[in-house]
Image: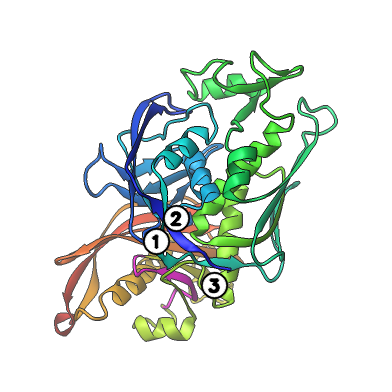
Amino acid sequence: MTRRQRTIALQAELEGKGLFTGQSVHLTLKPAPPDTGLIFRRVDLGEEAEIPATIEAVAKRFQRTTLARGEVCVETAEHLLAALAGLSIDNLYVELDAPELPGGDGSSADYVRLIRQAEIVEQDADRPVMQIVEPVTVQDGSSVVTALPGPEDELSLTYHLDYGQDGVIPPQIVNVKLTPESFAEDLATTRTFILESEVEDLRQRGYGPHASYEDLLVIGGDGPINNTYRFPDEPARHKILDLVGDLFLLNADLRCRVVAMGSGHALNHRFVRRLLEQAAHRGESAAAGRQAMDINQIMEVLPHRYPFLLVDRILSVEDNIRAVGIKNVSINEHFFQGHYPGTPIMPGVLIVEAMAQLSGVVLLKKLEHTGQVAVLLSMDKVKLRKTVHPGDQLRLEAEVIRAKDRRAQVNTRAWVAEELAAEAKIRFMLVPADQES
C-alpha cells in the first residue's frame, strides 16, 4: 500500500551542540518538493556543499551515521533520520553551519517536536515502497539483521539486546510496529547510551568533551549513573531508533518484519545496501529514478570491450547522478598472468579505471540528449587502501558532483565487502560528440 509523500509547511530552526564534537551548530529545516529526498546543506562551506541522504553517501565512522560528499560531511545524522522515518517525512532541506547535528539529549525528541511545530503536509506524489518477498540477512559474528516477508502494509521491528551473562545491561527484547504514533510514544525519547567501561576510551578519542553523566546515559553495574531510565528497556528501544534512522537511507517505505540482534550502525548500513541490491536483482525500483543495467546494457553505453571492460553489472543508476556497479575479480583476468605470478593482485590503476568506467556510464546517460560526451581529463586524491585479489567482488560507487559547461567532476569509491579499497576524484572534459576524436 502506497502513501503520498510528505514534507513540512513551515521553516523550523534549532540550536545545540554536537554529541561527539561538542561544537555549537545552528540547524534549519526547510520544505522540499516531491522526489527531492533529504538534502543536507553545509551553509558554512558554500552553495555547492550539499549531501543527499543516500546509502552511497555513508562514510565510515565510529558508532554513528555520517554522510559525506567529497570533503563535505555531516556527522551523527541518525537521530534526525529516525525522526523523519518515524514521522514519514520524505522531502526536506536541512541547513547547518557546522559538521555535526545538534545532539540534544541523545534522542530524537527535539527533532520530533521541531517537525510537528513546522506542520506536516502531504504532496502530490506517491512514496516508493520496498516489499520483501524472501529473507534477506547480513551478519557479523554474533550480530545479525534479517528482513522477513510480512504484512504488506506495515514495518515491524524486533531487537534483541544481550551483553551476555555478566553484562551490566540485562537481556532485552523489544518489538515495535512502526507508525508515527508508535515512534513518538515508544522510541523518540530513548537516548544514546554507553557503558561505564567505554567512557575513558571515548574521552581518549576526543568524543563528548562537553558531556557529563547527567547529559549522557552512562550505564554501570548498578544501572544509569546520575540518571534514570525513561523505559526499563530503553537501550533496546534506542537500538531500534538507530535502525529506523539508518533505514531512511533506503528512500522507500520498507514493508516487512525486521529482526536484529546485537547490530549497530555499520551492520545496519550493510543491511540497507543488501536490501537495495536484492531490489535491483528483482528489477524493482527501490526509489524514484533508480535503474539497474546488465552487461549488454552497459556495452550499449560504453565503448570498452574485452579485455578492458571492467564493470560487470550496475545495481543502480539514480537520477543520472549516482551509480553503483559490480566488478567480479576472477583468477582468469588476463593481468594476473604478470601481476604477480604466485601472488595475484589486481593493479590499482585498473581499480581506478573501473571507477572511471562507472563514472562514464553515469555521465553518458546524463548527456545522452545533449550531443556531448565525457573525456577523462584528470584524477585527484587517488588513494589505494586495500589490495584486491581473485575471488573478491569490487563494489563501485560514482557520484556526479557537477556537470555543466565543459567540465564534470565525479567522486568515486571501490569497496570489497565493508572495506574501502580505493577512492578518487575524477574530472572529465565535456566535448561535442563529433569532436571526440
Badge 2 local density, few (<14 within 10 Å), some, or many (20+)?
many
Residue identified by numbered label 1: 123
Badge 1 local density, few (<14 within 10 Å), some, or many (20+)?
some
For marks 1 and 2, the one nearer the N-term is 2
Q: In which quadrant of the rendered image does the N terminus lie?
A: bottom right
For the residues labelled 1 and 2, the Cα–Cα distance comes to: 10 Å
The image quarter in which residue 367 lies: bottom left
Q: In which quadrant of the rendered image does the C terminus lie?
A: bottom left
Is there CB contact under 8 Å for labels 3 and 2?
no
Numbered tag placed on residue 421 in the rendering: none
Range of residues picked out in magenta: 309-321
For the residues labelled 3 and 1, the Cα–Cα distance comes to: 26 Å
Q: Position of residue 35 (x, y in %)?
A: 38, 63
Instruction: Kindly identify the amino acid type of the residue bearing the numbered disc 2.
Output: Asp
Instruction: Kindly identify the amino acid type of the residue bearing the numbered disc 1.
Output: Gln
The figure's colour scheme reads rainbow
Residue identified by numbered label 3: 280
Residue in view at x 30 percent, y 71 percent: 363
Badge 3 local density, few (<14 within 10 Å), some, or many (20+)?
some
Is residue 370 visible in this depiction of the protein?
yes
Secondary structure at numbered mark 2: loop
422 shown above or below 285: above
Instruction: Kindly identify the amino acid type of the residue bearing the numbered disc 3.
Output: Ala
Numbered tag placed on residue 90 in the rendering: 2
Of badges 3 and 2, the one in the foreground is 2
Residue in view at x 26 percent, y 40 percent: 43
318 shown above or below 97: below
Residue in view at x 59 percent, y 76 percent: 282
For marks 3 and 1, the one nearer the N-term is 1
Q: Residue furthest top?
A: 226
Residue in view at x 71 percent, y 66 percent: 149
